[in-house]
Image (spheres, grey):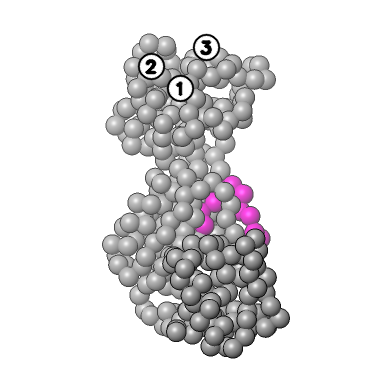
Amino acid sequence: MDKLRGMETFVAVVEGGNFTEAAQRLEISAVMVGKYVRELEDRLGARLLERTTRRQRLTEAGRVFFEDAKRALEQVRMAETSIERLRSSPSGTLRVSAPTTFGAYVVAPLAATFQQMHPLVRVELELSNRIVDLVEEGFDLAVRIGQLGDADLIAKPLTLYRMVICASPDYIARHGRPETPEDLASHRCLSHTAWHGRNGWKVKGWEGPSHWPEPDFTCNDGNGLRMAAIAGAGLLLQPEVLVAEDLARGRLVEVLQPHLPESHPVHLVYRQDTRPLPKLTHFIAHLIEHAGAPASP
């Protein structure tokens, strides 16, 4: 049996709480997890886990071995990382977290061009609007809009996240072009289902009622709202990165430019490391070079 694999499996079982979670984490079957644990116990000549149909617990020997095994595996990971640092070109797996829309329309294409330049890098991009824990979840880099989160992280400014209000030329021809925020009350305003009342449609200079009328069109996806706007469903308030090509091609027309919501800063955040890996430093430089020109507020 591979000693390190057995130790890694046992640690995954303890940290995951059961064989099923360990199997998912290691991408093997629960049967194989059980086999590794049994072989490890046979080799050590000691029972490490007491299992019932409902739960499992560590034996005294298991508790001692668990702590030592974790330290041993960490030493192995440090040794592997030290070799990777010696490489002159970026390589290895790069785990990145980014907000859904910005990640899809900005980070994903740039990650693709980065891989073309550095084919030894494997990219794992997670698109989510939640704030991930870089240390606990093993991310190398996170893109954050507004709130930065953990103060121990290094943060580098990237750009501004600008919102736009726009509509299709057909919609404007049929309903007119809004010139002031008050005009919105007589228009069909598309709304995201995550918004509540005026939570989403925050525009400068609005002094009307405290709540918007019930929206005529809602969707739980920004791209779905974009497609509806292109088809003439109404006014759209979404990030500029989502509709930049549509604006450039004339499929959508921007309105109410002086009354747009306030832009928010976008930062790249990553863990402090006196010797960051080439895969990270090169990717950060790539993002800043190609997405780092601040948009006008």
Q: Identify which amino acid the numbered label 3 is placed on.
A: Ser
The quarter of the displayed image where residue 13 is located? bottom right
Q: In the rendered structure, which disc, 1 or 2, sits on the residue that comes first in sequence? A: 2
Is label 2 in a helix, a strand or a loop?
Answer: helix
First of labels 2, 3 by sequence position = 2
Kindly identify which residue carries mark 2. Answer: 171
Residue 159 drawn at (x, y percent): 48, 49
The answer to whether the residues at label 1 and label 3 have Cβ atoms under 8 Å apart is no
Circle nearer the N terminus (1, 3): 3
Kind of element beneath mark 3: helix
Q: Specify whether residue 105 is painted magenta.
A: no
**Residue position for label 3:** 186
Q: Which region of the structure is painted magenta?
A: 142-151
The three-letter code of the residue at mark 2 reads Tyr
Q: Residue at x 37, y 79 (%)?
A: 88
Q: Residue furthest front?
A: 53
32 left or right of 144 in image:
left
Disc 1 target residue:
235
Task: Measure the C-alpha gap from mark 1 to mark 2.
Answer: 8 Å
Q: Label 2 near label 1: C-beta < 8 Å?
A: yes
